[in-house]
Structures are given as C-alpha cells and as structure tokens.
Image: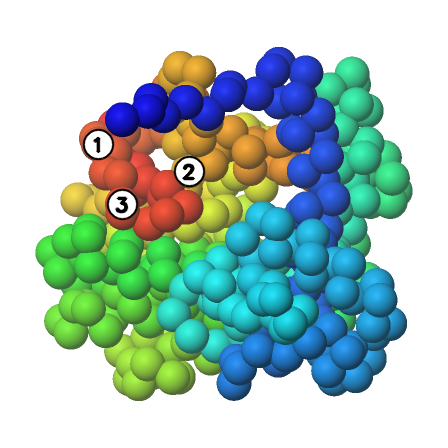
Amino acid sequence: MGSTKPPETPSPQATIHGMVSAVYLARAVYVAAELGLADLLHDGPRDAGGLAQLACCDTDSLYRLLRFLAGHGIFREDDEQHFHLTPLAAVLQTEGPGSVRAAVRMWDDPRWRTCGALLHSVQTGAPAFDHLYGMNTFGYWASHPAEQARFDAAMAKLSEGENVLVAREYDFSRFAKVVDVAGGRGGLIAEILKAHPTVRGTLYDQPQGVEQPTYVVAAGVVDRCDVIAGDMFRSVPEGADAYVVKRILHDWDDDRCVAILRNCREAMSPDGRVLVIDAVVPPGNDPHPSKTTDIVMMLIGGRERTEAEFRALYERAGLRLTRTLPTTARTAMVVIEGERA
C-alpha cells in the first residue's frame, strides 16, 4: 500500500494573503444575500442565465460571482453549469432554521465602510465612525430611519436563537418580575415569559424602540408584559426582581455603562439581580467571536469586555458580580449576574 501524503501547510505568506483577500469573500457573500440567490434556488438548481433574469443581474458577472462562492462551499456548480444549494448556501435563504440572511445583509450599513478607517481608531483611540460621518452611530440612525429599521430587523433576527437559549438555560422562574432594559421589539422578554409562565415582564426602551413590540404580541404574552418608554440613562422601572441588559453595554464607554447599572441597582427589589447578557473576552491567544466583534465596537465607539472589566463596572455601580454563566448560543453569549454589594 502506498503512503498518503499529508496536506501541505500553507506558508506564512500564503496565510497572510488569504486573510487579507477574505474581504472579497465577505463582500461576495453579502451580494448573494442581498440578491436572494439562495431563495431563488430553493426549488432546484438553475444556471447563471436563469438566476440573472430573476435577480436582474448581468449573466456573466453573476456567473463569476457564483463560481467564486462555489469555490468556498457556498453553492455548488455541476457539469452543466447549474448551481445548487449547499449547507452553507441554505442558511442564506430568508426563511428556515438558522437563517443568517438578515444578519449578512446588515453589513451594507455604514460600518462596512468604517472598516477601512480602522487605522484611525488604533492611532487615536477615537471611533472611526464619528470621524467619517461627523456623528456617532445613534445620531446616524436617528437621521436615517430606513437604515435603522433595516439594522434593527437584522439584529432582532440575529438575536432570536440567542433569546430562546438564554430563556431556557438561565432560571428566570425564581423571579416574580423581570425588566428587559433596552429590549427593543421584545424578543428576549417574550421568550422568558413563554418559558416561565409564572413570571411577569416589562419591556423598556426609548419610545421608538417599543413602538412595535412585535415579539411580545406574537408570543401571546401581552397580558403578562408591560411596555414602558423611557431613557435608561435617567431611570428604569422600579420594583422588579431582575433587570436584564442584553447586548447593550458593549455599545457604551465605562461611565455610561455604570450609569445604566447603577439605575438598575437603585430600582430593583432588595434581593434583586442585574443580569448583563453579553460576550466576555477570554484570555489567551485562541480566536473567539468576541475578539472579532470588539474590533467592530472599536470602530463605532464601544468595546467588548473581559470578566475582570465587567467586575470593575459592577463595583463602580455598587454591585457585586456573583457568577458568569456561559450559554450554548453560537454567538458566545454569557449571563453575568450581579447583586447589591
């Protein structure tokens, strides 16, 4: 029997070139998501001409895009130049389990262009977004409501899987009332109330945030959920046993985070808990989703934090970090629990 030659390890030069050129793959995936190509293949394979007609594209250019993506396992080209769905392409469909189409389409917002100004953030410590647009992201969304609506919809879709897991894996049943701070359309509080029938909830956000509590309505838990508009930097609804702050603190600097946490501390019942649900940056040199999103947050003025950094925020807010509980969410969400110090 002949020996099998092991695959060659790419040279350092080839590895770096691959990393840099990945920007083209990222953009190609976005284009496929924006055009809805995976949806167009739902009922069976098609050639580039048929797809181009449906997607209003140039046939030759679309073929070249599909050929490139097929080389990375996104679609498959057969001998007759028809393209098929693959497992990677399937999750780019609009509907279906694990769809990432909305999240991928989100990357056409200004953050994509901000990536090119990373050097500015690294050299100055200031958000590249503000440098390029003359305002922070929240100001930009306020003046571009259509783009904000698209971003909010994508984030809500991205969070759906996380919300189900957080609601099931953390024991919310020990609380009588839970407030979801800056909870948007209510995806998380809806899952908490569905999973724990004895709990009452409050969805709290800015007026435009809670204008359409679609998840609360769809879950059929309106009778157990108050919807309140307000400003989390000024106050939060009083008297609850748990205050949930999911994917919020990474948007803000330390002082603003402490203000949010302190407001939760002052409002909660004597034995209440503050539950920050966010990524936690681990030590060591292994890759981790939080290390990637931290670069995104650097560009727009936020940051991902280590457990020690969260502990310091809690202490400044008069809280004691009691434990951290990783979830099984693929986005590596962690429940960071705190109580009054």
Residue 256: image x %, image y %? 56, 36
Q: Earlier in the sequence, mark 3 or mark 2?
A: 2
- Residue at point 72%, 40% (across, down): 23
112 shown above or below 184: above
Per the model, the C-alpha gap separating discs 3 and 1 is 13 Å
Q: Label 1 sits on what residue type?
A: Arg
Q: Quadrant of residue 29?
A: bottom right
Neighbor class of circle 3 (other Cα within 10 Å; few <14, some 14-19, many 20+) is: some
- What color scheme is it? rainbow
Q: Is 150 situated left or right of 218 in this image?
A: right
* Residue beneath disc 3: 327
* Residue beneath disc 1: 323
Residue 332: image x %, image y %? 37, 41
* Residue beneath disc 2: 279
- Residue at point 52%, 69% (across, down): 85
Q: Quadrant of the C terminus?
A: top left
Quick one: 324 or 311, which is closer to the camera?
324
- Number of callouts in the render? 3
Quick one: 214 or 80, which is closer to the camera?
80
For numbered disc 3, what is the local secondary structure? loop
Q: Is residue 241 visible?
A: yes
103 shown above or below 59: above
Q: Earlier in the sequence, mark 2 or mark 1?
A: 2
Q: Are marks 2 and 1 in contact (CB under 8 Å)?
A: no
Q: Is label 2 or label 1 in front? A: 2
Per the model, the C-alpha gap separating discs 2 and 1 is 14 Å
Residue 231: image x %, image y %? 55, 56
- Residue at point 50%, 47% (across, down): 248
Q: Is 219 situated left or right of 12 in this image?
A: left
Quick one: 288 or 22, which is closer to the camera?
22
- Residue at point 21%, 32% (across, down): 323
